[in-house]
Every structure is written in C-alpha cells, then in structure tokens.
Amino acid sequence: MYQSIKNEIFHVHTWRCKHAADDRDYEYVEKAIDLGAGRIVFTDHCPFPGDPFRSRMDMAQLEEYISTLSQLKAKYASRIELVAGLETEYLPSYNNYYSELKKTEGLDLLILGQHMFEHDDGSLSFGDEDKSVEYVGLCRAIVDGIKTGYFDVVAHPDRSFRRCKTWTADMERAGLEIIREAQKNNVLLERNFSSMKHKKHYWKQFWSEETLEISIYGYDAHSVEEMEAFWKKKK
C-alpha cells in the first residue's frame, strides 16, 4: 500500500503529456522544495505501445522520463524525496504491459486514472455515441483494475460521474463498489484538486466519512504555477 505523508505533493504531470505547461521537471522539484514539501510524486500520463492515444507522452519518451527523474532523485536526495510514477487507465488488453511496467527499474508507482474503458469486444468507450451512462463502464473498469494489484492509488474516482447531472442511487451503488474494493485491496482513493475546479467532476456525495479514511489529496498539476496554487489550497 502506498504510504502517504502529510507534506507531499502527489500527482504531477510534465510537458511530455502534450497538454501541460513547458515547465521542466527540475522546476517542479525546486518549487516543491521552496514550498516546504517533503516528497513530490510525478505521475505523468502513461504511454501505450504503438502510441494509440493522444494527450500523453510518446512510447519513445518513457525511458527518458524515467531516466530524468532518476537523475533528479539523486541530485535532490538530501532535500526532498522524489517518486517516479505513471497515471494510466486500466484496459484488460494491456495486462501484460502493466506487468512489465511494474517490473521496470526506476518506476516506483502506477496510479489508476480511468478516463475511458474497454468494452467486451475490445473497442474503447471514447468512441461511444451515447455516453449518458458512461460512469457504469468507468466504475466497473476501476473495480477490475483495483483487483489486479497493479495500482496503489485511484486518481479522481468520482470523475467517473462527470456526465451525470444529479446524484442517484445507481451512482451511489457504483461508487460503493469502488470504495469496498479499495478497502479490501489497501488502495487509496484520490481527492483531486483539479476536479474540484470543474462542475460535476468532484462529488461530495462520494466522499463519505468512511471514504475519507482511505483518501489522499492529489494535485493533478500540469504546471509549476498550478502546483503552487494547489499547495496553498491544501494548506
């Protein structure tokens, strides 16, 4: 189980994902030190073999990403702990790939960020015309992903309900299934600062007192400026 610490900055992206600022990795680290953080956790969007998806690093960049963070770990070891991770969807077709990532030297952590899901026929949900009940597939994928043991943290689980208008009993049941599986497998659920900025991305109904016991704050920062703003929000 991932062990969170009080003064960490968890869930930081880099320029490689193609939708973040051009800030360099070391700039995040130095700002985190200035802010007084004891740990910074990089979790850029995971590439997939063949680069089938947009808005993430290319597969050819993965080795450089891990290498760069390893160098920064050593350089700043006396000042801050640095964790090198990836945020990825759980897609059953890529089980062998996740297994390889878990064994990759220099890669410390995989977190589950379910932005899409895989249908039984292998097609992906981003191509669905009707997304009105998208949350059903997203929540099911999160539960299945937790069961694999590949992931230590689920990023923004309540963002699965982003297309919903009001909280319903069906959403409650889907959310509870995630919570129960996370409890069973010692997986943390992320309360995401970026989600809190967007309507329908953060659902207070999901975060019961019980859920908060297995929660962690995540920044989902895509710039140094954003990281600093979320640090001040957390304080």
Image (cartoon, rainbow, N blue to C red):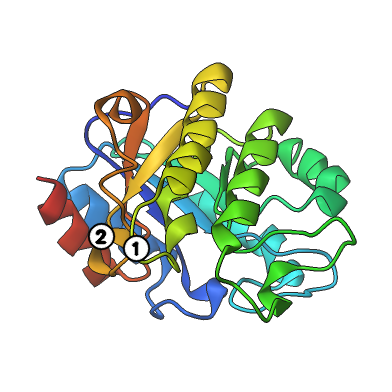
Q: CA distance from mark 1 to mark 2?
A: 13 Å
Q: Secondary structure at mark 2?
A: helix
Residue 14: percent from left, percent from top? 46, 67
Name the one closer to the observer, 223 or 190. Answer: 190
Give residue 196's mark: 2
Residue holding disc 1 = 221
Please say if 163 is above or below 101: below
Q: Please tell me which of labels 1 and 2 falls first in the chain.
A: 2
Name the one closer to the observer, 143 or 23. Answer: 143
Location of residue 177 by image quarter: top right
Q: Residue at x 33, y 71 (%)?
A: 223
Please say if 204 is above or below 117: above
Q: Nearer the viewer, mark 1 or mark 2?
A: 2
Q: Is residue 31 left or right of residue 170?
A: left
Q: Residue at x 52, y 28 (%)?
A: 182
Q: Secondary structure at mark 1?
A: loop
How many residues crowd mark 2 within 10 Å: few (<14), some (14–19), many (20+)?
Answer: some
Q: Work out which quarter of the rendered image holds the C terminus and state it.
A: top left
